[in-house]
Image (cartoon, helix red, strand yellow):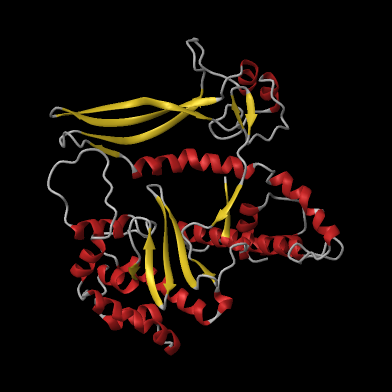
């Protein structure tokens, strides 16, 4: 036996009474596993690679298990064609999603996100009498449901509201700052009203409670929530089916001979509807804030696109049929004497409905400023204008114009108002 193997055997395994021949066999594996010069980071890298490989193999095994036929010869990724089999999916879907999850998610989004966006869109109040006075909202909060009386314990449960014919609601508070003379006053937690709270939402006392806790509150664990309690009566908000907001809808009226593309703009600040319509072989821009229809070429010039060729390419593209149909609209600018952006703004400004709330001191604003404000904030309100750059809004109007031209050439491109893809369910 080689003399070098004896200390290795003693270091690796305890001494036994086995024969010498078996000692050489037992000493062979430790000789192969002798430590090699390496650094600690290398060991960690090898371990991470091994873990990643193990995870990858486990993922592949799990994926193969999912795709393996395990029910009537079908795997998880196979389509289900029989109606009887599809009905079996309904209990599984209801067990995971339920029937009121969309109501609860919508209310949670309204409380957590929409309220803050609405406040941000209308966060500053100016005075028409004293320009130095202003009031600014800096934050909004919705608390937990409380009583609306003088009792010491303000907490309340839905069952108590049912018995006492009260509303299950929480207080809305805001953070505000305003001027008092030359001093800025800041106040936090100012109550401005109360908001009914949906049962099982994030602001409800029933959210995340165990069955034992719900039993102590006299609530049924199987009650999914998704409704309100107003004056002791359970009320639910019905789902409303409406046309999609901020989406181009092309329609036609054969009786009036009108083809139009309409968009209902909806933001947290305002809601309005804009039309681009073909009337008497001319295309116009129509909006409630403008007294009369504006030729679309003049509207595009007011947004900074002055070259007729650029207007033609934006609206008609490279199709000769569309160019021929749109070319007569370029004459409207020459007939109205509009060749520059300033002239187009003055043309539109003289037709804008000026609405002011309260008394406003100072000289009257020029008409071109009225036109610029209307185009920037009212017409297509959902298309944001930054730094008075109307590029995106002009492209949007040009897209609506091209949709009208395409619908005139092919009736199949007219949208169906009853098509479910053009509708949304609003909660």
Using residue 4 as the reference point, say whether residue 346 is left or right of it: left
Q: Residue at x 82, y 65 (%)?
A: 74
Above or below: residue 366 compared with residue 116:
below
Q: Residue at x 36, y 26 (%)?
A: 189
Where residue 422 appears, as percent x and y from the top left, is 57, 62
- Res 134 quadrant in image: top left
Quarter the C terminus occupies: top right
Where residue 89 appears, as percent x and y from the top left, is 78, 54
- Res 163 quadrant in image: top right
Does residue 4 appear in the picture of this structure?
A: no
Above or below: residue 277 compared with residue 59:
below
Residue extending farthest front: 255
Quarter the N terminus occupies: bottom right
- Res 115 quadrant in image: top left
Using residue 72 as the reference point, say whether residue 284 is left or right of it: left
> Is 200 or 15 nearer to us in this picture?
200
Where residue 113 appears, as percent x and y from the top left, is 45, 43
């Amino acid at each position: 036996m080689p003399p070098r193997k004896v200390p290795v055997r003693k270091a690796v395994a305890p001494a036994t009474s086995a024969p010498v021949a078996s000692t050489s066999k037992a000493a062979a594996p430790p000789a192969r596993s002798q430590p090699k010069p390496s650094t600690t980071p290398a060991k960690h890298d090898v371990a991470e690679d091994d873990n990643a490989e193990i995870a990858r193999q486990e993922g592949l095994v799990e994926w193969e298990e999912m795709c393996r036929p395990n029910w009537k010869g079908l795997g998880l990724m196979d389509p289900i064609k029989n109606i009887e089999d599809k009905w079996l999916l309904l209990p599984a879907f209801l067990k995971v999603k339920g029937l009121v999850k969309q109501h609860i998610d919508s209310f949670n989004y309204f409380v957590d996100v929409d309220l803050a966006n609405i406040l941000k869109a209308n966060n500053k109040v100016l005075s028409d009498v004293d320009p130095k006075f202003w009031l600014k909202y800096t934050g909004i909060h919705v608390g937990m449901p409380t009583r609306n009386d003088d009792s010491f314990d303000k907490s309340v449960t839905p069952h108590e509201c049912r018995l006492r014919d009260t509303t299950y609601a929480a207080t809305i508070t805001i953070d505000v700052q305003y001027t008092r003379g030359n001093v800025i006053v800041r106040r936090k937690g100012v109550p401005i009203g109360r908001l009914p709270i949906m049962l099982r939402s994030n602001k409800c006392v029933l959210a995340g409670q165990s069955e034992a806790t719900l039993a102590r509150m006299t609530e049924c664990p199987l009650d999914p929530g998704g409704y309100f309690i107003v004056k002791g009566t359970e009320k639910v908000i019905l789902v409303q089916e409406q046309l999609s907001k901020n989406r181009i809808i092309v329609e036609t009226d054969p009786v009036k001979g009108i083809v139009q593309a309409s968009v209902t703009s909806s933001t947290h600040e305002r809601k309005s509807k804009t039309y681009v319509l073909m009337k008497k072989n001319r295309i116009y821009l129509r909006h409630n804030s403008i007294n009369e229809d504006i030729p679309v070429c003049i509207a595009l010039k007011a947004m900074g696109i002055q070259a007729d060729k650029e207007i033609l390419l934006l609206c008609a593209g490279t199709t000769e049929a569309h160019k021929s149909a749109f070319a007569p609209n370029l004459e409207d600018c020459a007939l109205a004497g509009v060749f520059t952006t300033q002239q187009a703004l003055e043309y539109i400004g003289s037709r804008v409905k000026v609405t002011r709330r309260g008394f406003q001191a100072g000289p009257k604003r020029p008409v071109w400023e009225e036109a610029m404000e209307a185009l920037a904030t009212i017409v297509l309100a959902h298309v944001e204008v930054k730094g008075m750059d109307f590029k995106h809004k002009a492209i949007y109007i040009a897209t609506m114009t091209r949709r009208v031209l395409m619908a005139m050439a092919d009736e199949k491109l007219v949208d169906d108002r009853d098509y479910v893809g053009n509708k949304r369910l609003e909660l």
